[in-house]
């Protein structure tokens, strides 16, 4: 079964075998839940698909923060995964001592992470901002297309007037046709929360929904 609800999976820390000062048994005081961490998933990586494996090295601070972090491994360079991991690491906090009872301040920690891509994501045009976590939309993937491993895109245009009670949306483009992506996008746009580019911008919105089938196990 494909589980895309988890954006990131933090593996056991790795380390240089000749570094006796490494933190091998971290005790976390604070870790971001997947729903929070997933907001940092890079758009370029989502569009390319396939996820990424990353590793960073940080120095534990006296307050438990991970300082001076740097990326030492990125399986998909240039797609924003490294930058996203550095932001996510800012949400972590260590307890003052590790599980073996040793203070962590000043000691290195190697942190591995696997980023799993969403299978449904949206792009809005004209400065509109998508506000939701894309992992909430996985159930919108047309079931037959998902089972067959078919990927596709659909563009939906919504038009209305400020203060109007109804907004009319239509499917402008769909590829490939006959797989249900247009109908799925039309239904999904009703659930997506968006922010207009400026106050009084009206309700005209053009949005492309992409459906990316996960690789076969």
Image: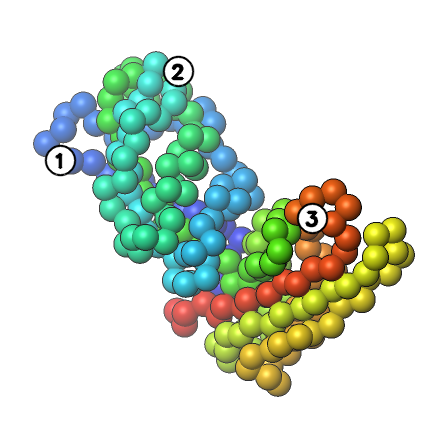
**Which residue is depicted at the point 70% across and 67% down?**
157
| Residue 161 placement: quadrant | bottom right
Q: Dot 2 corresponds to which residue?
A: 63
Disc 3 versus disc 1: nearer the observer:
3
Q: Residue 192, can we see it?
A: yes
**Which residue is depicted at the point 63% across and 62% down?**
207
**Which residue is depicted at the point 35% across and 26% down?**
66
- Residue 67 rendering spot, x and y as whole percentages: 33, 25
Work out whether mark 3 precedes mark 2 in sequence or the reverse, and give the earlier one.
2
Q: Dot 3 corresponds to which residue?
A: 196
Q: Quadrant of the C terminus?
A: bottom left
Q: CA distance from mark 3 to mark 1?
A: 51 Å
Q: CA distance from mark 1 to mark 2?
A: 26 Å
- Residue 74 rendering spot, x and y as whole percentages: 28, 49
- Residue 186 rendering spot, x and y as whole percentages: 71, 69
Dots 1, 2 in contact, CB < 8 A: no
């Amino acid at each position: 079964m494909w589980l895309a609800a988890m954006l990131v999976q933090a593996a056991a820390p790795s380390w240089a075998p000749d570094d006796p000062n490494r933190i091998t048994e971290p005790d976390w005081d604070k870790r971001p839940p997947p729903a929070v961490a997933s907001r940092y998933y890079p758009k370029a990586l989502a569009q390319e698909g396939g996820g990424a494996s990353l590793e960073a090295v940080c120095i534990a601070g006296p307050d438990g923060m991970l300082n001076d972090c740097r990326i030492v491994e990125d399986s998909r360079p240039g797609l924003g995964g490294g930058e996203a991991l550095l932001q996510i690491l800012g949400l972590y906090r260590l307890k003052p001592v590790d599980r073996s009872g040793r203070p962590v301040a000043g000691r290195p920690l190697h942190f591995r992470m696997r980023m799993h891509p969403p299978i449904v994501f949206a792009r809005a045009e004209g400065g509109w901002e998508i506000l939701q976590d894309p992992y909430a939309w996985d159930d919108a993937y047309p079931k037959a297309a998902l089972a067959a491993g078919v990927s596709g895109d659909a563009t939906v245009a919504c038009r209305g007037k400020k203060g109007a009670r109804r907004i009319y949306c239509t499917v402008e483009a769909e590829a490939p046709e006959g797989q249900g992506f247009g109908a799925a996008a039309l239904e999904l746009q009703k659930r997506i929360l968006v922010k207009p580019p400026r106050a009084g911008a009206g309700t005209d919105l053009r949005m492309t929904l992409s459906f990316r089938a996960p690789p076969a196990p």
